[in-house]
Structure formats: structure tokens, C-alpha cells
Image: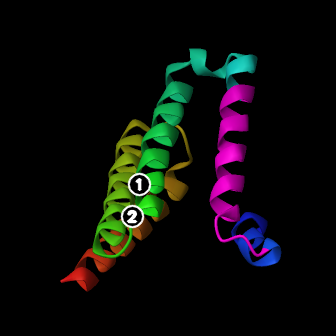
């Protein structure tokens, strides 16, 4: 929540995106230094971070319908990601993956529905 509010607190609209980006890069570096990316399960999280981060950046750099479609696509892709990990019983707890998959899918399809 503080990262989201940082734009209002500082008066810089891009502050939340910059702060979250810096934190993501810091976590990747910390994971690399600790050898966390040597495990396949952790590498899957890294690839997901990179992929969903790229979708997020693309959504921020565009506007209007394209931005909404990118956000919806990212949410639906994350729902699929959660279902895959739910089936594999890996990465996060089952209840969290179930909730997140349903929440992301409903929100993603609601955004798509609102576009048309």
C-alpha cells in the first residue's frame, strides 16, 4: 500500500511504478546472490516476474483501450499461471492459488467485457 500511495505523497505520478520496479530488481538481485534461482521452482517465479513485469510496463506506456486490454490480458495470464501451479501443487499454497486464479480471471474478463 505505501508503494501505491507514494505517487500522491510525493506528487510524482510515476513514483509507484518506479518504487515497485526498484523493489523487484532488488529482489531479483538478492535471489541471485543467495542462489535461489538455481532451483526450478524459483526460476519459474523469476520468469513470471519478468513476463508479468513486461506486461505491466507495456500497460503503463500505453493508454486507453490498449492499456485496458493489456491489463486484462495480464490478469487472465496470471489466472492461468495460478491454475498451472495449483495443479502442480507448487510455488504457493493451494488456497491462495485457487483464490487468486478465480479473482484474476473474473477481474480480467470483467475488464474485457467493459471494453466492448
Q: Give the range drawn in magenta.
A: 11-30
Furthest-right residue in this view: 9
Q: Residue at x 41, y 46 (%)?
A: 86
Q: Mark 2 — residue?
A: 62
Badge 1 density bin: few <14, some 14–19, many ≥20, Cα 10 Å = some
Asked if residue 107 is positioned above or below residue 36 in the image, the reply reads: below
Q: Name the residue under label 1.
A: 58
Query: How far from the left and from the top, in percent, is residue 14?
Result: 64, 64
Predominant SS of the magenta segment: helix
Q: Secondary structure under badge 1? A: helix
**Secondary element type, mark 2:** loop
- Please report the residue visible at 48 percent of the width from the left and 53 percent of the height from the top: 57
Q: Position of 86 compared to 18: left or right?
A: left
Q: In which quarter of the image is the C terminus?
A: bottom left
At a point 66% along the width and 21% down the height, the residue shown is 36
- CA distance for labels 2 and 1: 6 Å
- Of all residues shown, which one is farthest toward the left? 116
Horizontal relation, residue 35 to residue 103: left or right: right
User: Toward the viewer: 54 or 96?
Assistant: 54
Q: x%, y% of residue 15? A: 70, 63
At 70% across and 45% down in the image, what residue appears? 22
Is 87 drawn above or below residue 38 in the view shown? below
Quarter holding the N terminus? bottom right
- Do the residues under discs 2 and 1 have CB atoms within 8 angstroms? yes
Whether 12 is among the magenta residues is: yes
Badge number at residue 116: none
Question: Residue 27 location, x and y as percent?
Answer: 70, 36
- Name the residue nearer the viewer: 10 or 52: 10
Amino acid at each position: 500500500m505505501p508503494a501505491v500511495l507514494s505517487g500522491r505523497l510525493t506528487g510524482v505520478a510515476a513514483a509507484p511504478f518506479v518504487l515497485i520496479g526498484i523493489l523487484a530488481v532488488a529482489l531479483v538481485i538478492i535471489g541471485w546472490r543467495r542462489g535461489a534461482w538455481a532451483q526450478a521452482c524459483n526460476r519459474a517465479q523469476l520468469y513470471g516476474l519478468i513476463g508479468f513485469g513486461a506486461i505491466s510496463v507495456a500497460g503503463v506506456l500505453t493508454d486507453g483501450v490498449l492499456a485496458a486490454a493489456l491489463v486484462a490480458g495480464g490478469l487472465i495470464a496470471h489466472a492461468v499461471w495460478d491454475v498451472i501451479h495449483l495443479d502442480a501443487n507448487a510455488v504457493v499454497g493451494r488456497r491462495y492459488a485457487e483464490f487468486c486464479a478465480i479473482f484474476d480471471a473474473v477481474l480480467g474478463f470483467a475488464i474485457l467485457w467493459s471494453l466492448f
